[in-house]
Image (cartoon, rainbow, N blue to C red):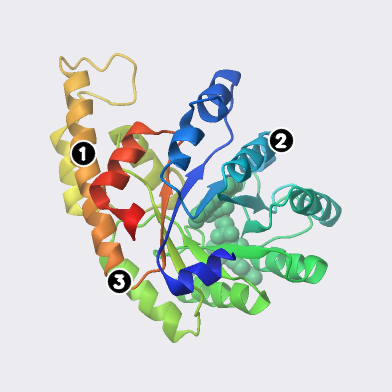
Amino acid sequence: MKMSELMKQRMAFSFELFPPKTEAGEKKLLGEGGVLDKLSTMKPDYISCTYGAGGTNVGKQLPVLEAIKAHNSTPVAHFTCIGNTRESIREQLQNYLDRGIDHILALRGDLPFGWTGTGGDLCYATELVKFVRDEFGDKFTIAVAGSPEGHIACRSLEADISFLKQKQDEGADYIMTQLCWDMDQFLRWLDAIRKAGVTMPVDVGIMPVLDAAATINMALSRNGCVMPRELCEIISKYWIFPNPFVSDPYDADVAGKKAAFKEAGLEYTVRLIDEYRVCGINGIHLYALNKYEDVAKLVEMSGIKDM
Ligand code: FAD
């Protein structure tokens, strides 16, 4: 079933994985009794797999997508314009279809450091959506990214929303959002996109708050996300002195603080999921970070498996 159709009937629940970078990582994710085996027992509606930033690690995506399909879940392939010609896009998308993969997340992609453009034939996700529809008709269900706080490089939130509407007009089926902890901003954005005529289901991306450094990095390295007071308080309370980014941080209780941060972060993430669920959204998409235990705990605590 098309995920966009399912989301019109009920809330969807999904995970996001990334292609492992090492053989050990591959075994941990795809091996017998590994993370994918375990995540699949929760019966997510779909599992997506990222496309290497800057076109790197792309070859590793297919085995993950095929494994997801073999686990009776719907694989959703992230796909970007970075470094891709029209011909290479055609080839890769046909390759997905040949393997029974018919859901994609059509993205521009993050520009590699120092690049000013995509280095490919297409510049924006709008063009990619149009290209996929022109070349492949209705064979793909197409998800697109939405940024509730506005994409970091957008000239205005209004412009960003108009490009989102354009993605819908070109044939996109549903929205997967960028992480957003600021509920006031999320509600403003949801209201604004509906007023702008964007009717696509909204599948909310949730980054589990498990580790202080990863949380700060995810928010600020690329996305410029607002961190609400409550989240900042958790980060401050369990701050590892003098610096969480160095290997020897001179703090007597590093392990204790990390564990306490994770516990507080899980509770924070559950409250965030609750807040999203009452906004009339259509799905919860958990960035599973190729982990099982913490993600399973989150699923259990939030009850999203039974949505
Ligand atoms: P676009 O929608 O093309 O927007 C990019 C910028 O250009 C925005 O500022 C927008 O306002 C502006 N813009 C858009 N259209 C036009 C136009 N026609 N004219 C002028 N300006 C325009 N990246 C990866 O590399 N690999 C992944 O696997 C990946 N997965 C992701 C998953 C999710 C759920 C999300 C939300 C993001 C993901 N990203 C991934 C990151 C994404 O590629 C970046 O956010 C990227 O910088 C923008 O992609 P986009 O599709 O939103 O771009």
Q: Nearer the viewer, residue 280 or 149?
A: 280
Residue shown at 56% from the left, 22% from the top:
27
Q: CA distance from mark 1 to mark 2?
A: 36 Å
Q: Is residue 295 above or below residue 273?
A: above
What amino acid type is highlighted by mark number 3?
Answer: Cys
Q: Nearer the viewer, residue 224 or 209?
A: 209
Pointer 3 with pointer 2, Cβ within 8 A: no
- Dot 3: element: loop
Left or right position of 299 against 85: left
Give the numbered dot on residue 279. Answer: 3
The x, y position of residue 214, in whole percent, is: 36, 36
Q: Earlier in the sequence, mark 1 or mark 2?
A: 2
Q: Which residue is mark 2?
A: 59
The x, y position of residue 21, in whole percent, is: 59, 27
Crowding near the residue tagged with mark 3, few <14, some 14–19, many ≥20 C-alpha atoms within 10 Å:
few
Crowding near the residue tagged with mark 2, few <14, some 14–19, many ≥20 C-alpha atoms within 10 Å:
few
What amino acid type is highlighted by mark number 1?
Answer: Ile
Pointer 3 with pointer 1, Cβ within 8 A: no
Q: Residue furthest right?
A: 87
Left or right position of 156 against 274: right
